[in-house]
Image (tube, rainbow, N blue to C red):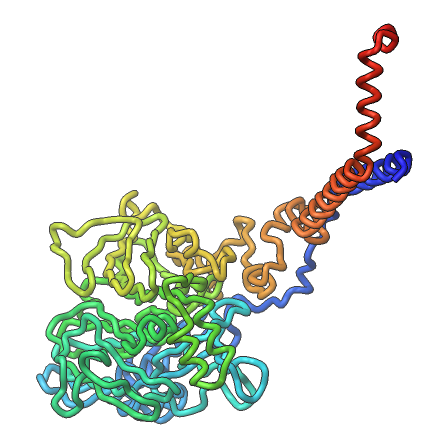
Amino acid sequence: MPIHNFIALLTFFMLTSATIAQASLKLPETIKVDPAALTAEPMCDPKISPAWREAQVIDGVKIDASPGCSPDNPAWIAAAVKGTNNISMDTLMKTGLSPDAIIKTDDLDGDGDPDRIIIKLEIMELNGKSPDFPGLVPTFDIAPGIQPGAWVFAPKTSGMSTENFESVRANPLLRLPSPVIRVEVGDIVQIVLENTHYFPHSIHLHGVDHPFSHGEHGGQDGVPQTSEVELMPGERRIYQFQARQPGTMFYHCHVQTHTHLAMGLAGMIVIEENKPNNWLQTLNIGAGHVRHPSVAVREQFDQEYDLHYHAMDKELSSIIQKHNDPRLIARDMNQRYDITDSTEDYFTLNGLSFPYTLRESLIIVEPDQKIKLRLLNSGGELIAVHTHGHHATITHYDGVEHNPVAQIMRDVFDMAPAQRLDLKLETVNDGKHSYGEGDWLFHDHREKGITTNGMAEGGSMSSIVYTSYLGEHGMPKVSHFGIELNKYFTKEYYERRLPVWQDLDAWSSLGSPAGDIGVDAATQTSLLNALYGLLAGLLIYLIFAKREQIKQCAVAAVSRLKSPKGSNQ
């Protein structure tokens, strides 16, 4: 290659590189996402009647007010207290429960309440693959557009798994988490598990006082390796116990526990003290607010809440969204899924993630109250629950009362997997129990615990909200602080299409840049590196191809420098 051609080529590549580098310095324009283009939804579920928030009496059952945005169906509470066998047909029809879902009979000790309790549970799938169309069925959103595959213990229903023939949305009774079971010391309790699923399952009564085996029904500790064979699809099994100690306990499937529990087959069991005329809310389905507390709780507290924390792995939950064949699901779950490499991606409180936790799982209080909180961590990792503006007192660990003299007050509560804590939350404004009225955050202080599939804000965030900070529709009043919650009620936010801070100022200085800067920069860098590599290659080629001429030129130059004439020059 002639030297002048090489110089021309070198000049071309240098000018091209400089042009690209200069172009990379140009900043992209800001693109503001139009709110009208978002898939926005109401903050409160429009299918829930505002009348459900009010205190009321149904079939003789007194039901406390629950002023949150989306309270539980009062008919469920009446049925849970009286039993589906003791309520009117009108109330039963409003529940969707099977007539034999909760049977209460026989006042064995003569103290005015039933002592023989039968609870029937089914196993249902949420957000699974449909054999009839490309979508999922029945659907249950834990946050806007977020539908992880899950399994739940559900109360026996009288209808379909969907709302109706035209909907794929789950029957409201079929939801995360599995319901809280609440009975009294001394009750003879039978939990009848009807396996309506395609996999074998069981129930382990974790922490509940129960015999290892039952003469009529065989083993009943729920463990296939020690006490019983797996309950196959279409079969049923009775788990019977008569608890002797009160406390907050736990129940879960013990078949392939590393996947079945993580998929959602877990719930809380509460054993209450034996008190006269103690008609209990035997099932607490949904929001966690106990709207018909026990006699013992009412003697000491103004309110009670069940708070169930659970986390799910996206890789695991997606398996049931890929296959309809149980063999393929079993293969992927039992042989290919490796829990030692798992990550928890969805963090929930009472089955929901922020912002839906604002609909259901607020702790709504007034000044100078005592609130009982029962907490369960059924996830696979330690959590650290933090109460802003309050210090609560730990009264019980794993269902056992802590020494009253040694009960400690904290604002961060560590909970290992499967651990339960009972807390006493007091709202007296003394700078220790409470800092005063407000909308105080209540969250897992591990930073990933406030994300949903890695996107913040999300996760199990909730609030301790004083009624003076609660709006008429049951949402916290934050707009007068300039805070808008609407953006969180869009699926685009959790799809990462809505910039987090685009509306902080009028010119959207932190809005979305046109194009993807990260990809453009990487492309430009790769192109420049390629050009530099090509240039270096051409230089090496030129040296190799013209090595004889270069050698001769070098020898001639050295000779000229050594000659006297060259020196004079």
- Percent of width and height locating residue 344: 42, 62
Q: Is residue 471 visible?
A: no
Which quarter shows the C terminus? Answer: top right
- Tell me which corner region of the image, top left, top right, bottom left or bottom right, holds residue 231: bottom left
Relative to 370, say whether 107 is above or below: below
**Screen quadrant of the N terminus:** top right
Residue placed at 75% from the left, 42% from the top?
Answer: 537
Out of 383 and 213, give the one closest to the viewer.
213
Foreground residue among 51 and 499: 499
Residue 97 in percent (x, y) is at 36, 88
User: How many numbered marks does the figure carry?
Assistant: 0
| Quarter occupied by residue 379 | bottom left
Asked if 149 appears above or below 231 in the picture, the reply is above
**Image position, residue 33 (x, y; %):** 68, 57
Task: Look at the picture and state if 53 lies above or below 213.
Answer: above
Q: Nearer the viewer, residue 439 or 568?
A: 568
Kindly tell me whether residue 361 is visible in this rendering: yes
In the picture, measured across the screen, residue 458 lies left or right of residue 510, that is left
Q: Closest to the observer: 2 or 249?
A: 2
Q: Is residue 391 left or right of residue 95?
A: left
- Whether residue 229 sits left or right of residue 13 in the image: it is left
User: Which picture quadrant has residue 540?
Assistant: top right
Q: Residue at x 24, y 57 (%)?
A: 424
Image x and y of residue 154, in percent: 35, 82
